[in-house]
Amino acid sequence: MNSSSLFSIIFSVTFVVILFGGLCKANRVVQVDIINDIGSNIQLGLHCKSKHKDLGSQSLAQHQHWGFRENLNFWETTLFFCHFVWENQSKWFDILEANRDKDICEHHPCVWSVRPSGPCRLTGTEKCFPWN
């Protein structure tokens, strides 16, 4: 076997491995669910988006929830951020950050409780985060 044939075989095998790995990762979907736990009878306004997709504005009554589904990109850099407003408050938070959430939220909805002190991810072990 000459070096040209060997190179072609190695290149082909490498290409197939990369393509197959990419296709497996391409179908990874995360469900995000956001719950208004700001306080008694306080309306929560929110607007979520990524660099390429705007999910629009929402308004949630106490304990009401809203959510979305999104594919994680191949590079696992998917990022959705939300702007939250209530009464005289205005806060931001990265509600879907692939590196942080992929292992916890890939097989179960990623449920977030939005509280005055910051959002808490309820999926898995509850973990609260500060506002951005």
Image: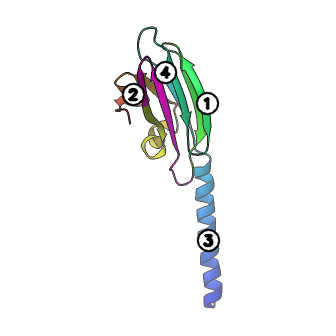
Q: Secondary structure at mark 3?
A: helix
Which mark sits nearer the N-terminus, 3 or 2? 3
Residue 70's image quarter? top right
Separation of disc 3 and disc 4 at Cα? 47 Å
Q: Secondary structure at mark 1?
A: strand
Separation of disc 1 and disc 3 at Cα? 43 Å
**Residue 13's disc number:** 3
Q: Secondary structure at mark 2?
A: strand
Separation of disc 2 and disc 4 at Cα? 10 Å
Query: Residue type at mark 4?
Result: Ile
Are dots 1 and 3 in contact, CB under 8 Å? no
Q: Is residue 90 above or below residue 25?
A: above
Residue that extends furthest to the top in the rendered view of this protein: 41
Which mark sits nearer the N-terminus, 1 or 4? 4
Q: Residue at x 52, y 26 (%)?
A: 46
Q: Main secondary structure of the magenta part?
A: strand
From which residue to which does the magenta span run?
74-91
Q: Residue at x 52, y 22 (%)?
A: 45
Query: Residue type at mark 1?
Result: Gly
Frontmost of labels 1 and 3 is 1
Mark 4, residue position: 35
Query: Residue type at mark 3?
Result: Val
Counting the numbered discs, the total is 4
Q: Is residue 27 visible?
A: yes
Q: Position of residue 34 (x, y in %)?
A: 50, 25
Q: Residue at x 50, y 33 (%)?
A: 82
Query: Residue type at mark 2?
Result: Cys
Mark 1, residue position: 56
Residue that extends furthest to the front in the rendered view of this protein: 88
